[in-house]
Image (cartoon, grey):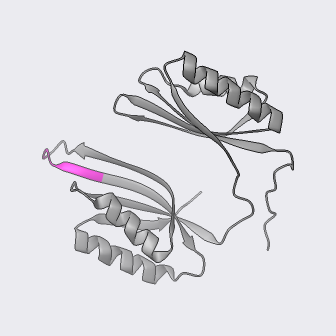
Amino acid sequence: MTLPEHRPAPNTHYLLINAFSTHPDSPLLRIARRITDSGCNLEDARLSTLGQDVIVSARAAGSWDSIAKLEAMLGRMEREENTQIFFKRTEIKTGYSNLLPYIVEVVSADKPGILFELAQFFDAQGISMESLACTRYQAVQTGAQMFTAQITVGIPADMHIATLRDDFLEFCDALNLDAIMDPMKF
C-alpha cells in the first residue's frame, strides 16, 4: 500500500524561527501572537529552557505576503524587546521516506565527547538523527556526574536492524554506555 504524499498548497511558504530570551520571559507567546497576527499558521514548535535561557524553535506557514509580514514583525520584535531572533525561509519534507523511526536512549557516567561519539557512530552508518535531547546531571544517590540522551534516529528501511543493534550495543559497551535502541511506538 502506498501512502499518499503530503503536498503543501503551491502558494504556501515556510519560515523557520529560533528565538532566545532569558527565563522566565519565554518568547513562545510573543512569537505565536505574531505568527497569528501576520495571517500565518504555527505548524511546529519546540521550547527548551537551558540554564537561564529559553529557546523557541518554530515553523510558520502562510502565503508569500503573510510570511513577509511575519518577517517584518519579527525584526521589530528583536529590536524592541529583549529577544534574539534568527529566522529564514525554509521548505518542508515532502512525501514519505524509507526511514524507520527508532528511539535511542543512553545513560552513562559523564565524560567529554560522548555526544560526539554517538553522532559519529550514526553518521558513519548513514543514519540521520531526527531529534535529540541530552543533559548532564548529578546522581542523587552517589553524587556522580551523569550523562543521558534520548535520540530519535531514522534508519533506512533496507538496513538489517538486528546487525545494526548488535553493532550499536558493541559500540556502547566499548565506551561503557548503557543504551537501548527500540522502534518508536506511536
Q: Residue furthest left?
A: 142
The C terminus sits in image quarter: bottom right
Residue 112: x and y, percent?
23, 56
- Rendered residue at 24%/74% (across/down): 174
User: Relative to 170, does residue 67 appear above or below in the rendering?
Assistant: above
- Rendered residue at 12%/47% (across/down): 142
Label total for image: 0
Residue 178: x and y, percent?
28, 64
- Rendered residue at 71%/65% (across/down): 96
Is residue 109 shown left or right of residue 64? left
Residue 162: x and y, percent?
46, 81
- Rendered residue at 60%/77% (across/down): 157
Residue 59 magenta-drawn?
A: no
Is residue 28 shown left or right of residue 173? right
In-front residue for pair 43/178: 43
In-front residue for pair 186/46: 46
In-front residue for pair 176/25: 25
Point out the stretch of residues depicted in magenta.
142-147
Is residue 56 shown left or right of residue 91? left
Q: Quadrant of residue 60?
A: top right
Q: Is residue 158 visible?
A: yes
Residue 165: x and y, percent?
42, 76
The N terminus sits in image quarter: bottom right
User: Relative to 49, does residue 164 appear above or below in the rendering?
Assistant: below
Q: Quadrant of residue 140?
A: top left
